[in-house]
Image (cartoon, rainbow, N blue to C red):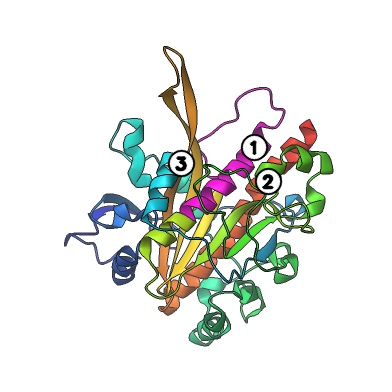
């Protein structure tokens, strides 16, 4: 077990602690290739925690196997610098847009540290993968641009448990989220590369009908899509356009947070708690895997005259980044991704269970 340590450093400068369990070269490379919250690795005074904690996962009896769907889109939606501005206007923000709240500090989720530690929780000896196992994983994923992430638990050494095995997922094609309520009319229709959601049987029909625009991503003519998706994977070509990747990640995360939040407030009779991680989006580009958390906040705004109201704001925060061309960090990246599957499944299950009990 590593010793816990907390180190402040300016990654964009020269005052680096090279003893950190971070691959600085890969972080720098990731900073250059972009990401929705890259301000914290471009000179931002970031808090870097090396805490490898053991967090007990939820009991398997309480978990509903999520399912996987791939869009396999032939012509991806158009995301560019203008889309980032449109997302900001729709109150979908990276952590570097905290100035909306009138202060200079990033607005991290309340459970940021716990979630990040949970992603680092060891499982089934994945950190003990030897070079041959890492190479086998790379060989399985590289030709398909990570379309075979679910094969991770079939490789020697295993990465998962029966509740998250590949048999619990399925994939489809061209999964554009045309049935979701748009955040703004000028935004493209989301079409994530991969997304995870709950099994159809987990959500009562009445609940699906009541929250159709928020938790059912595909049109009613499509059969049994994963519902209330709150884990996404976006895959970029080498040297992908930075702003397009940022926009895709931000848009997906907002869709996921809103789906879970609408389940949490369904017939609740009062405001649901906000400020905690409800969705995770992974981005894989230039052989770097990065994971971002998403949470909701409400910001005050003036509507008309002396009346005031609040506006939902969806905020992303960088959790971790791993250079997948390094054996050790490849293992840690797979570990974090598999743990993210468990975490988001638990969040979704709890929201669905609560909404179902109130239906």
Mark 3 or mark 2: which comes first in sequence? 3
Secondary structure category for the residue under label 3: loop
Mark in the foreground, 3 or 2: 2
Q: How crowded is mark 3: few (under 14 residues within 10 Å), some or many (20 or more)?
A: many
Looking at this rendering, what residue extends furthest in the left direction? 14
Q: How crowded is mark 2: few (under 14 residues within 10 Å), some or many (20 or more)?
A: many
Q: In this view, does 16 lie above or below 74?
A: above
Asked if residue 340 shows in the view, the reply is yes
* Residue 150 horizontal side relative to residue 352, left or right: left
User: Quick check: is 238 in the magenta stretch?
Assistant: no
Secondary structure category for the residue under label 2: helix
Quarter of image, res 81: bottom left
State the image coordinates of residue 145 (x, y, percent, origin top left): 53, 77
Q: Quadrant of the C terminus?
A: top right
Q: In this view, does 56 lie above or below 184?
A: below
Alpha carbon distance from label 3 to label 2:
22 Å
Q: Is residue 79 above or below residue 148?
A: above
Q: Kindly identify which numbered label has been placed on residue 262.
A: 1
Q: Please give the name of the residue rendered at 60% of the width and 30% of the height, measured from the top-left corner.
A: 272
Q: Please give the name of the residue rendered at 53% of the width and 34% of the height, measured from the top-left corner.
A: 274
| Of the pair 121 and 109, the residue shown nearer to us | 109
* Residue 18 horizontal side relative to residue 308, left or right: left
Q: Start and end of the magenta stretch?
A: 249-277
Q: In which quarter of the image is the N terminus?
A: bottom left
Looking at this rendering, what residue extends furthest in the bottom direction? 132
Quarter of image, res 172: bottom right
Q: Kindly identify which numbered label has been placed on residue 109.
A: 3
State the image coordinates of residue 71 (x, y, percent, origin top left): 63, 66
Tell how many labels.
3
Name the residue tied to disc 2. Answer: 215
Secondary structure category for the residue under label 1: helix
């Amino acid at each position: 077990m590593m010793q816990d340590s907390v180190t402040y450093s300016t990654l964009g400068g020269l005052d680096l602690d090279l003893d950190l369990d971070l691959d600085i070269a890969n972080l720098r490379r990731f900073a250059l290739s972009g990401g929705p919250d890259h301000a914290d690795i471009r000179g931002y005074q970031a808090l870097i925690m090396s805490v490898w904690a053991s967090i007990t996962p939820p009991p398997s009896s309480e978990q509903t196997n999520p399912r996987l769907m791939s869009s396999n889109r032939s012509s991806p939606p158009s995301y560019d610098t203008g889309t980032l501005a449109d997302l900001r206007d729709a109150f979908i923000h990276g952590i570097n847009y905290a100035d909306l709240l009138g202060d200079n500090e990033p607005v991290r989720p309340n459970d940021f540290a716990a979630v990040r530690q949970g992603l680092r929780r060891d499982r089934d000896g994945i950190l003990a993968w030897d070079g041959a196992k890492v190479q086998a994983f790379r060989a399985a994923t590289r030709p398909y641009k990570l379309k075979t992430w679910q094969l991770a638990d079939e490789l020697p050494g295993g990465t998962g448990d029966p509740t998250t095995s590949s048999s619990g997922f399925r994939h489809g094609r061209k999964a554009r989220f045309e049935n979701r309520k748009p955040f703004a009319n000028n935004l493209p229709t989301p079409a994530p590369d991969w997304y995870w959601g709950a099994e159809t049987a987990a959500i009562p029909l009445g609940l699906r009908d009541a929250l159709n625009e928020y938790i059912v991503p595909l049109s009613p003519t499509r059969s049994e899509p994963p519902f209330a998706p709150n884990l996404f994977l976006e895959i970029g070509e080498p040297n992908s356009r930075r702003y397009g990747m940022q926009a895709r990640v931000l848009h997906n995360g907002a869709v996921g947070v809103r789906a879970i939040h609408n389940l949490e407030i369904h017939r609740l009779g009062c405001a649901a708690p906000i400020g905690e991680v409800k969705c995770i989006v992974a981005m894989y580009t230039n052989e770097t895997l990065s994971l971002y958390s998403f949470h909701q906040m409400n910001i005050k705004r003036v509507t008309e005259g002396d009346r005031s109201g609040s506006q939902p704001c969806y905020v992303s925060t960088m959790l971790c980044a791993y250079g997948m061309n390094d054996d050790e960090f490849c293992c840690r990246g797979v570990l974090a991704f598999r743990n993210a599957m468990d975490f988001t499944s638990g969040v979704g299950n709890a929201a669905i269970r609560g909404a179902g009990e109130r239906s």
